[in-house]
Image (tube, rainbow, N blue to C red):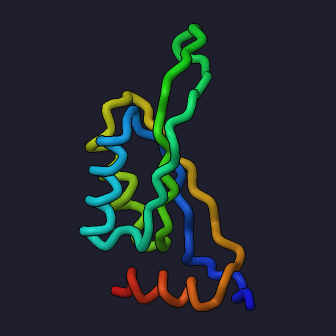
């Protein structure tokens, strides 16, 4: 059964240059209670234009499952730890999901 939209639940998407750095960031967020769960994806190729040049980089995606009240600290941590001048940080609002899972997420991040 799905729960009604929770305006506080978010998924933050970002990428890291390698597996080790991605794992370190995920662990920091879980330990600091900024995320209930962080999914670390398989390395992928990112293609983008940067300073008028086409770039291709191998990156490791992170899906950070969190709540609105944690976002500012997550953003600050990413900006502090990320080696890129401009790391990608995209926020998606959660519009529903398995009720028990969303309750667990709320419990993990309750303040």
Quadrant position of residue 47: top right
Quadrant position of residue 27: bottom left
Quadrant position of residue 26: bottom left
Where 14 falls versus 32 (above or below)?
Answer: above
Where 14 falls versus 67 (above or below)?
Answer: above
Residue at left offset 62%, top offset 78%: 7
Q: Residue furthest front?
A: 42
Where 105 falls versus 23 (above or below)?
Answer: below
Residue at left offset 39%, top offset 32%: 17
Horizontal placement of 14 versus 108: left or right? Answer: right
In this view of the protein, which residue sits in the foreground, 60 or 87? 60
In this view of the protein, which residue sits in the foreground, 91 or 31? 31
User: Percent position (x, y) of residue 94?
Assistant: 65, 71
Horizontal placement of 16 versus 53: left or right? Answer: left
Residue at left offset 32%, top offset 67%: 30
User: Percent position (x, y) of residue 1?
Assistant: 74, 91
In this view of the protein, which residue sits in the foreground, 20 or 9? 20
Residue at left offset 27%, top offset 50%: 24
User: Percent position (x, y) of residue 14?
Assistant: 49, 46
Q: Quadrant of the C terminus?
A: bottom left
Q: How many marks?
A: 0
User: Percent position (x, y) of residue 83?
Assistant: 31, 31
Horizontal placement of 45 versus 15: left or right? Answer: right
């Amino acid at each position: 059964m799905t729960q009604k939209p929770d305006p506080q639940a978010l998924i933050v998407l970002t990428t890291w240059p390698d597996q080790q750095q991605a794992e370190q960031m995920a662990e920091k967020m879980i330990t600091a209670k900024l995320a209930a769960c962080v999914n670390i994806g398989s390395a992928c190729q990112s293609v983008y234009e940067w300073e008028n040049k086409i770039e291709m980089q191998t990156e490791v995606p992170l899906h950070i499952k969190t709540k609105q009240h944690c976002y500012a600290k997550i953003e600050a941590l990413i900006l502090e730890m990320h080696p890129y001048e401009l790391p990608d940080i995209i926020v998606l609002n959660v519009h529903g999901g398995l009720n028990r899972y969303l309750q667990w997420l709320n419990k993990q991040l309750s303040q």
